[in-house]
Image (cartoon, helix red, strand yellow):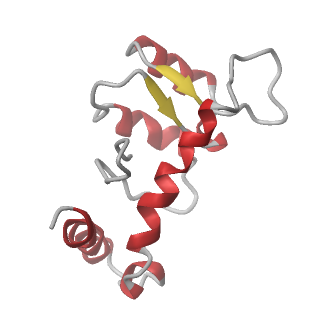
Amino acid sequence: MTDSLCRPLAFLLTGGNVADCTAAEMLLDRLPAATLLHGAMGYDSDAVRRNIETMGVAPGIPPKSDRRGNLCFSPVLNRGRNAIERMFNPLKDYRRLATRYDRLTQNFRAAVCLAPTVSYWS
């Protein structure tokens, strides 16, 4: 999760077989005050959209190609979704993160916490 200045706010490490929509519930608990929440197609589920809307935030999530029904989605507003990509690009400069050298989750989590501290908050 990032803010409007592309700085990291929260992250969640999951296994490779965990769907984005299941991890979204835990990240939504850390959402600061917002009016619009951008997300990738992986977060397009009814449960995630319902949780976002109950928080009083508009979901800016593009619908999956196999979704039935007509959802309100603005491609113009979706242009701001690249904030998450702009947050990850400086972190990929750290080879340790980009190639995942650490085998243990606790070591990788420590590197993920340390890299943004050096990159964004110094």
In this view, 55 is above or below 3:
above
Q: Is residue 116 left or right of residue 6?
A: left
Query: Nearest the camera: 109 or 34?
Result: 34
Query: Nearest the camera: 34 or 16?
Result: 34
How far from the left and from the top, in percent, is residue 55?
38, 16
- Examine the image and state in which quarter residue 44 appears: top right
Query: Nearest the camera: 45 or 37?
Result: 37
The quadrant of the picture occupied by the C terminus is bottom left
Q: What residue appears at the point 43 percent right and 81 percent down from the top-left corner? A: 100
How far from the left and from the top, in percent, is residue 61?
61, 32
Q: Is residue 112 left or right of residue 17?
A: left
In this view, 64 is above or below 101:
above
Q: What residue appears at the point 84 percent right and 33 percent down from the top-left corner? A: 66
Q: What residue appears at the point 46 percent right and 21 percent down from the top-left corner? A: 52
* Count of marks overlaid on the render: 0
How far from the left and from the top, in percent, is residue 4?
37, 41
Tell which residue pokes out farthest to the left in this image: 122
Q: What residue appears at the point 43 percent right and 18 percent down from the top-left corner? A: 57
In this view, 20 is above or below 69:
below
Q: Is residue 76 left or right of residue 52?
A: right
